[in-house]
Image: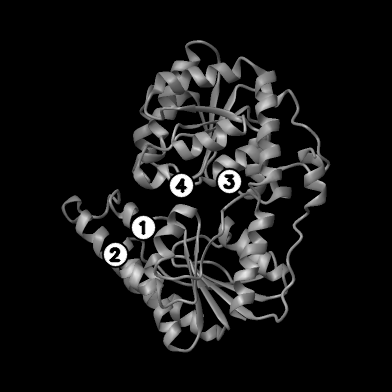
Amino acid sequence: MTWRKILKKKQLNYLKVVDPMKICHITSVHSGLDTRIVIKECQSLAKGGHDVCYIVPNEENRTEYGVKIVGVSTSPRHPVARILKTTRSVFEAAKAENADIYHFHDPELIPIGLKLKKLGKKVIYDVHEDVPEQILSKQWVPRRVRKLMSKAFARYEKKASSKFDAVVTATPYIMEKFHPYNSNTVTIHNYPILSELMDEDGSERGMSSMTSGKVVYLGGIYRLRGIVEMINSMEWVNQVRPAKLVLGGTFAPPALEDEVKQLSGWKYVDYRGFLSREEVKQTLGESQVGLVLLHPEPRFVVSLPIKMFEYMSAGLPVISSNFPLWKEIVEDNECGICVDPLDEAETSRAILELLDDPERCRRLGENGRKAVADKYNWDKESERLIEVYNKLN
């Protein structure tokens, strides 16, 4: 079965619930329209028949995707201030909703989850990242205390997780860490929604995009996610042929933007800032190659980056870091090239290989689309999520 037939067959068929519940998702960090939380999880639950709200800082009250967005006014920007102040405001707003099930998305909200348990509520902890590993590379944490803080948080997180009704993890690697402490731990992959980036009529990408010379990176722009190497690689590429790096996302820290603008390769960058989901689709549609070149940090090596699957879903060939898990996806599905993300020459050669061969780009892109339609899509994940809720009902 081709990916076009699969797409037409799977148009977000949500599993209906037996007994609708009031569900409250909570964050102190994420945005009002976070893709995983709102567009995928909350929307899936709402379409399944639940009454769903989302508590989020600094957003206007409104309804999006069938989900009631409840904004909480906060001002702290520093992580410590946010943990101390914002979480209290979020807790009060969540408690006022008097939901049947609470689903929180940030490790700093673990104390809030425990408070809600004491109030007799059912609570789900959604683990997006391997936080103990993440702490080891946090710039705002003094280097001399990172290891101690990482170990202390790992112990605290595992002990707390045993008290929650369910733990949802973004990858199997994270699930393996939590399952010994909470048997109701399940992986909900952050895969793309089938119909979002694929054209519903099943049309192929035009060859104009496959000759555009545009290489794209979308997502958080951090040093450890390869921004410096990507820009430097574009300078190498432009010594051979014209090409542009289309960059979408926000810099962290903000000062990094000024720093990379001093690189000589910046003149080959088309920086578009934060993009809406529709702008993401448009940007991917005009690009020829997608980059996901995260550094070989322990937490990245076992991650499953959503941007890689979004590139595949949009029919883009992928150039990715050569981590074993990523190589298995990219090479087994014949949808791109894996490189050493720290080797700018190797990355440049891979970019040139694809830019100079539009037919290969088309073929690899089609392979990626089929792989997403076959297995790396949100449809199956949404059913698994609703099953978690049905078990708690």
Residue 122 image position (x, y, % from top left): 52, 81
Tag 1 residue: 131
Classify mark 1: helix, strand or loop.
helix
Q: Would residue 314 be visible to someone looking at this image?
A: no
Local packing at callout 4 (Cα closer than 10 Å; few below 14, some 14-19, many 20+) is some
Residue 377 is left or right of residue 165, and the answer is: right
Which residue sits at x=49%, y=80%?
93
Q: Which is in the foreground here, disc 1 or disc 3?
A: 1
Disc 4 marks which residue? 303
The residue under the point 71% across, 44% down is: 373
Q: Which residue is mark 2?
A: 153
Q: Give the image quarter of residue 345.
A: top left
Camera-nearest label, 2 or 3: 2
Is mark 2 in CB contact (under 8 Å) with mark 1? yes
Disc with the residue nearer the chain's start (2 vs 1): 1
Q: Earlier in the sequence, mark 1 or mark 3?
A: 1
Report x, y in % for residue 378: 65, 54
Residue 341 found in image quarter: top left
Q: Amino acid at mark 1?
A: Val
Distance between the alpha carbons at the discs numbered 3 and 4? 23 Å
Disc number for residue 275: 3
| Mark-to-mark CA distance, 4 and 1 | 12 Å
Q: Position of residue 66 (x, y in %)?
A: 70, 68
Q: CA distance from mark 2 to mark 4?
A: 20 Å
**Element at badge 4?**
loop
| Looking at the image, residue 169 lies above or below residue 388 | above
Labelled pair 3, 4 in contact (Cβ < 8 Å)? no
- Distance, label 2 to label 3, CA atoms, is 34 Å
- Please name the residue shown 21% across and 54% down the image: 147
Quadrant, the C terminus: bottom right
User: In what element is the residue under mark 2?
Assistant: helix
Q: Nearer the viewer, residue 36 or 334?
A: 334
